[in-house]
Amino acid sequence: MRNRNRLVLGILILVPVLFYLVFQLGSKNKYKELPHFGTPKGITEKGDTVYHTLPPFSFYDQNHKSYGSTNMKGKICVVDFFFTRCPSICPILLGNLKKVSEAFPKSSENELNLISFSVDPTHDSVEVLQKYIAKHKITDKRWHFITGNRDSIYDLMNTKGFLVYKPEPNDEPGKFNHTGIICLIDPEGCIRGQYNGTQDEEIDRLIGDIQVLRVKYVKNRANK
């Protein structure tokens, strides 16, 4: 009888301990901190790091509407660089970004935006972008295709902005070299990830990191 009582007492003591350990391990794996890309700007008086953020900018999207840094504020943004005549990596980038779009079907436009900057804006007018979107049956309203001044877009890509290399234009589309990097931008305008947009495993990593930001920003905002 005494042995039985000891066994019951032991179980009663052990169960809370096990529950605590499981909870602690689960909570530690629930959220991971993503890195910040770029050289920090400094430190605040409180000792907080001031990270690299995107500078102010404004161009036009496929709807003839201005789109820029103000529209990105407070949203998780996935950014790539393409051009409509590209015969090489752009079709792969497009297909992989569709996977990202489909991975978050219930996200609102105020939560997640996909942004594709044309690196050949002289050719890729708003009308050309509209035809491209129709051809590829893109219906996601969260997806903005951007055109504007070429020099301004190129300047935004480099050290002042997205930290990717500037394109090397060429009259032959097949020889027009440009980056295949996809950037993940948090709601504060900081770069939190860069991914090879042509590799499936990198797209899986991107989707996972988007979810990390959703946990940190979107759910926390909903609880306020």
Image (spheres, rainbow, N blue to C red):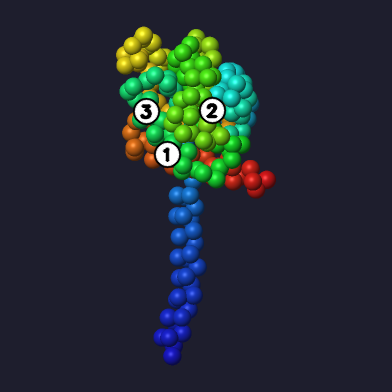
Instruction: Name the residue at 31% across, 14% down.
Output: 175
Q: Secondary structure at mark 1?
A: helix
Badge count: 3
Dot 1 alpha-carbon crowd within 10 angstroms: few under 14, some 14 to 19, many 20 or more: some
Task: Please state the horizontal and vertical placement of residue 191, each as a whole percent of the image.
Answer: 49, 28
The type of residue carrying mark 1 is Lys
In the rendered image, the residue lying farthest to the right is: 224
The type of residue carrying mark 3 is Pro
Please state which of residues 100 and 35 is positioned toward the viewer in this rendering: 100
| Residue 35 in the figure: left or right of residue 72 | left
Quadrant containing the N terminus is bottom left
The type of residue carrying mark 2 is His
* Relative to 25, residue 14 above or below: below
From this viewpoint, is residue 54 visible? no
Dot 2 alpha-carbon crowd within 10 angstroms: few under 14, some 14 to 19, many 20 or more: many
Instruction: Name the residue at 36% across, 30% down.
Output: 92
Instruction: Name the residue at 68% across, 45% down.
Output: 224
Which residue is denoted by mark 1 in the rendering?
99
| Upstream in sequence: badge 1 or badge 3 | 3
Task: Please state the horizontal and vertical placement of residue 119, each as a whole percent of the image.
Answer: 45, 16
From this viewpoint, is residue 175 visible? yes
Q: Which mark is residue 91?
A: 3
Please state which of residues 115 and 159 is positioned toward the viewer in this rendering: 115
Which residue is denoted by mark 2 in the rendering?
144
Q: Nearer the viewer, mark 1 or mark 3?
A: 3
Separation (CA) of disc 1 from disc 3: 13 Å
Task: Please state the horizontal and vertical placement of residue 120, each as a whole percent of the image.
Answer: 44, 14
